[in-house]
Amino acid sequence: MKLVRFRKGEKVGYGILKKRRIQKVEGKITGDYQVLDEYYTLSDVELLAPCSPSKVICVGLNYKDHAQELGMELPTEPIIFLKPATTVIGPEDIIKYPKMSQQVDYEAELAVVIKDQIKNITPDQAQEHILGYTCANDVTARDLQRQDGQWTRAKSFDTFAPLGPVIETELAPDSLKIELFKNGELKQTSNTAKMIFSIPKLVSFISQVMSLQPGDVILTGTPPGVGAVDLEDQIEVKIEGIGTLKNKIG
């Protein structure tokens, strides 16, 4: 099932996407909701980021082929960092190129959306607390990351966490093709089977550190091929079974 969040006029709602029609639901998609006999076509609405996280937790260096590309040893435990909720934008929204940076990079990632409040869970318990999966772009001001020696400023600019277009709730995430295109040219390609740490391991590990809230998002790392963007570039993150997240640089 593909869940979406959308705006129609001044109202924001949730729905289930079936081909190019949205059936509206009432209530929280992370909890109990009622399916209504109310429909919209995609052309009638604006798709938003499919959830509103309190935080975005990111994982660095989680693909074996990316570590090989960088000549780095595989980490022995996940490397995590945060993006604030203000970085989140939806499909077709503009990624704003900050004036203080001279190098902004794309990073295609599979995103996990948390279903309920969790703390200190085991990997075996993780799946029951996952609502579903979506596409993400962990946009990064790479020059500022190098300059600062840590990642907060480089990862935290407004618009630096595009999410969408849907949350796919019926998906096995352990062998999915993941790609990124810049202006139609393939730049990143890999498979989630090449992750160093599995999604259950990541959800469990992060829950040992911090409480996770309904709608929180975990970005699970990027494959090889990360590169820079320029103004007016069109970036597309495509993940098997989910769809394509499109954003322009502005």
Image: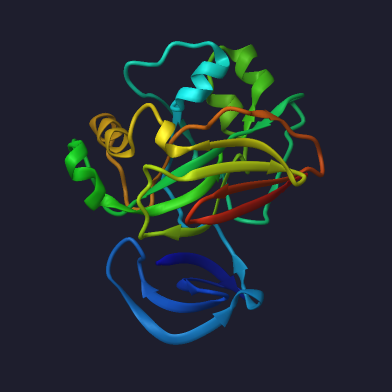
- For image coordinates 45% across by 78% down, the residue present is 24
Residue 45: x, y in percent?
Answer: 62, 73
Residue 91: x, y in percent?
Answer: 62, 56
Would residue 130 be found to the left or right of residue 62 on screen? left
- For image coordinates 25% across by 35% down, the residue present is 204
Residue 138 visible, this orientation = no
Give the vertical position of 219 relative to 39 (above or below). above
Give the vertical position of 51 relative to 11 (above or below). above
Nearer to us in this view, 238 or 167 = 238
- For image coordinates 45% across by 56% down, the residue present is 51
Give the vertical position of 47 relative to 64 (above or below). below
Residue 166 visible, this orientation = yes
Would residue 76 be found to the left or right of residue 46 on screen? left
Q: How many labels sit on residues?
A: 0
Which corner quadrant of the image does residue 181 belong to?
top right
Residue 36: x, y in percent?
Answer: 39, 84
Residue 112: x, y in percent?
Answer: 40, 46
Would residue 106 be found to the left or right of residue 79 on screen? right
Which corner quadrant of the image does residue 78 belong to?
top left
Colour scheme of the rendered structure: rainbow
Nearer to us in this view, 58 or 243 = 243
Rendered-image quadrant of the C terminus: top right
Would residue 224 be found to the left or right of residue 122 on screen? right
Rendered-image quadrant of the N terminus: bottom left
Nearer to us in this view, 45 or 70 = 70
The outermost residue toward the bottom is 37
